[in-house]
Amino acid sequence: MSLDNVNHGELLALRDTLRSFAAARGWQAYHTPKNLVMALIVEAAELVEHFQWLSGEESLTLPAEKLTAVREEVADVLIYLIELADVLQIDLHAAARDKIARNALKYPAPD
Amino acid sequence: MSLDNVNHGELLALRDTLRSFAAARGWQAYHTPKNLVMALIVEAAELVEHFQWLSGEESLTLPAEKLTAVREEVADVLIYLIELADVLQIDLHAAARDKIARNALKYPAPD
Amino acid sequence: MSLDNVNHGELLALRDTLRSFAAARGWQAYHTPKNLVMALIVEAAELVEHFQWLSGEESLTLPAEKLTAVREEVADVLIYLIELADVLQIDLHAAARDKIARNALKYPAPD
Amino acid sequence: MSLDNVNHGELLALRDTLRSFAAARGWQAYHTPKNLVMALIVEAAELVEHFQWLSGEESLTLPAEKLTAVREEVADVLIYLIELADVLQIDLHAAARDKIARNALKYPAPD
């Protein structure tokens, strides 16, 4: 499947939902990029916390309850990332595709 | 637009691209959840670094060059988040939708 | 007061206390540098969480209860930093003094 | 050695040095707690970056060059922690001792 053929609506639809969500609660004034990067790294750290005392191998086979908690933290990171991209008017999907293209040049695959 | 009607292929397409990318370079062995959450928070911090000495207001109007750098860091966070979700077999889009639904119950909008 | 004249025992005394603490609980096996840097950044993020929605000005005048919580997080960061330095056999105080000296060369004070 | 008998000047001496350093460069206006916790977590993440792809075992035996870089990052974390404690008027050493005492109650050592 080529990246060019997929529907690009998924992240934009989440963005629209989150935008309405914040507006309905009057949270926009708090959503400066400075504040949102702080919220983002806090959620990233809540993710790190689940893995800090595990071995690499243990981290691959989480108990169901922990996996559920991790799934929530992963969602929180995505949510703040989408909100940050929104206030900075960054197209998250295009940014990721561009970065992957740059990485392909930077780290050529062995033959 | 309802979230139910969008094509859900965007994040999965990025996941597939990143999966091939890592496989072609023999990086899968390094991609344990433990290592990936570390890489994720490192990228989140590179994002934080751009904003640490700015006021909230300044953070809303970045110079073009800084915005370009921030766009790359935002992409890096998304890339590692997709890779982490992949090794944990978490559907990132479903996780975000579920979390937004839970947040709507937790923080009811004022009338 | 010159830095050269102070007693250097404070951080080493904390280190000794923390070393006994971990040994008495059988925690040393978990105290690899990799795990400790994860624990350290988790505590740093708990600190960030207290400030994420505050303005710079508000962050200077915390309510008493919040300040008490922040004081605990600050302590946690120092504790993990001392434990990390210990397992890596880094003299924390000497490292800080060396870094300040390097910073003085890198950022000369205006006349 | 009891913690009560050590000279408590080490962290205060570093604080005084850092206070003069910032004053001489006109940096105090930037040193709000909000900004300093951001700078702190950025330095913590630079530490994490050195360990993200290493196994726990590898993290215990760093090559000399990497250890030198890690030593600098450890120093940076301590420096920002001292500056943060200073603007919040927290006695870092007392905070750490209080927290260790609380931890001793929370996690009693097995007999």
Image (cartoon, coloured by chain):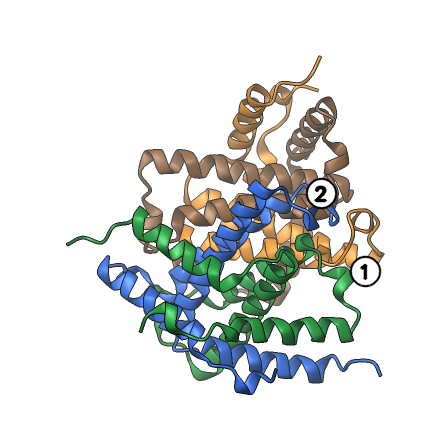
Chain colours: A green, B blue, C orange, D brown
Residue farthest front in this picture: A5
Q: Secondary structure at mark 1?
A: helix
Residue B5 placement (x, y as % from top left): 53, 86
Q: Name the one closer to the observer, B53 or C47.
A: B53
Quick check: A86 above or below B96?
above
In this rendering, would B98 be left or right of D62? Answer: right
Instruction: Determine which quarter of the picture holds residue D79.
Output: top right
Q: Chain of mark 2?
A: D
Can you name the residue that lies furthest to the bottom here? B4
Q: Single out the residue that lies furthest toward the left.
A: A111
Where residue B26 sits, quadrant-wise, is bottom left
B108 vs A70, left or right, is: right
Q: Residues within 10 Å of mark 2 (few under 14, many from 20)?
A: many
**Residue type (three-letter) at the residue carrying disc 1:** Glu
Residue wearing tag 1: C65
Estimate the spatial distance between the alpha carbons at disc 2 and disc 1, rounded to whole Å: 16 Å
Residue A16 visible from this viewpoint: yes
Q: Residues within 10 Å of mark 1 (few under 14, many from 20)?
A: few
Q: Residue at x 42, y 39 (%)?
A: C89
Q: Which residue is mark 2?
A: D85
